[in-house]
Image (cartoon, rainbow, N blue to C red):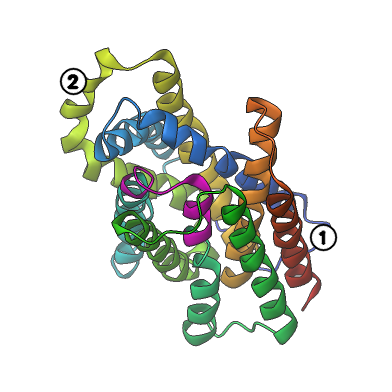
Amino acid sequence: MSAASSSPATSRDATAIGAVIVTILIWASAFPAIRAGLEAFGPVELGAARFAIAGVPAALYLLITRPGWPEWREMWRIATGGIFFVALYTVLLNIGETTVSAGAASFIINVNPIITAIFAMLLLNETFSRAAWLGTVISFAGIGLIALGEGEGLRIDIGALFIFGAALCNTITTIVQKPILKKHHPVTVAAWNIVIGALILAPFMPAAAMQLPHASPEALFAVVYLGLGPSMVAYATYSVMLSKFPASRASNFLYSVPPISTLLGFLWLGEVPGLIAIIGGAMALIGVIVVNLTK
């Protein structure tokens, strides 16, 4: 069984930096891909199809590497990732995005770093300085400006509550699984998460298969991309991030996702962001920098 490094990452740690970059870039593209997939699939069916695709290579990875079974006292931590970070997170986020705009969704989901920092201090004995909190506030305010820059405002409806629930699922998994990354390789933990989540969502695959013939090429591409990119790759790189950084700091990097998503929308789709959104994106990135310059 491979052991993961538990030492804090430094600026020269290429693995940690690479994991941050890959996670941010891929998860930034997940929000528009989810919206494209929801045009043809129901929220639960989209999640089932997405992780059915990701579950196959994840299972093959476990079969080939044979990392061994976690100890009984660790099983609940492994199961938490599959239940909360894969199955529940995916379904709640998908349902929320049926009624909530992308900017508002990114604003709501980004309460996660704040909640994670609080619980990391209480349960993991992590420290988060005043300067780090200042950076977090700057980032969160910037995400709010990005959402307002869409022109649709920040409305609170049932979809927003589902997205908030998804944010809580992320926090729960981050706090629960951080300790086991000292012993188990992060990619192995991510693979177990994906396989367990895929099995939980598997009963909805027949319904997803019935929707498949009516899906457009764009929706089909979105499902495949979600399975291979944001699911298989980004879940693994996020686990690497969590093994290299304190939980509070690893989650704080995710404030970079909305501004990068806005940039990708401009480069790929020609969606020109407004001045407010540009200012918000700059604030979000500045906040991340402030947090990571503190010790």
Give the secondary structure at mark 1. Answer: loop
Q: Where is residue 218 in the image (x, y as percent from the top left)?
A: 45, 18
- Measured in 3D between alpha carbons, the distance from the residue under mark 2 to the one under mark 1, in whole angstroms, is 49 Å
Is residue 175 positioned above or below 4 on the image?
Answer: below
Q: Around disc 2, counting alpha carbons within 10 Å, would you say few (fewer than 14), some (14 to 19), or many (20 or more)?
A: few
At label 2, which amino acid type do we have? Met
Q: Residue at x 39, y 29 (%)?
A: 37
Specify whether residue 100 is in view. yes
The residue under label 1 is 11
Q: Are marks 2 and 1 in contact (CB under 8 Å)?
A: no
Q: Around disc 1, counting alpha carbons within 10 Å, would you say few (fewer than 14), some (14 to 19), or many (20 or more)?
A: few
Is residue 104 highlighted in magenta?
A: yes
* Of the pair 170 and 284, the residue shown nearer to us: 284
Q: Is 50 on the left or on the right of 181, as rendered?
A: left
Nearer mark to the viewer, of 2 and 1? 2
Q: Give the range drawn in magenta.
A: 95-108
* Of the pair 209 and 70, the residue shown nearer to us: 209
Q: Which of marks 2 and 1 is nearer the N terminus?
A: 1
The residue under label 2 is 210
Q: Is 182 on the left or on the right of 291, as rendered?
A: left
Q: In which quarter of the image is residue 217?
A: top left
Total marks shown come to: 2
Is residue 151 highlighted in magenta?
A: no
Extreme-right residue of the structure: 12
Q: Residue at x 63, y 34 (%)?
A: 265
Q: Position of residue 192 (x, y in %)?
A: 38, 48
Main SS category, magenta section: helix
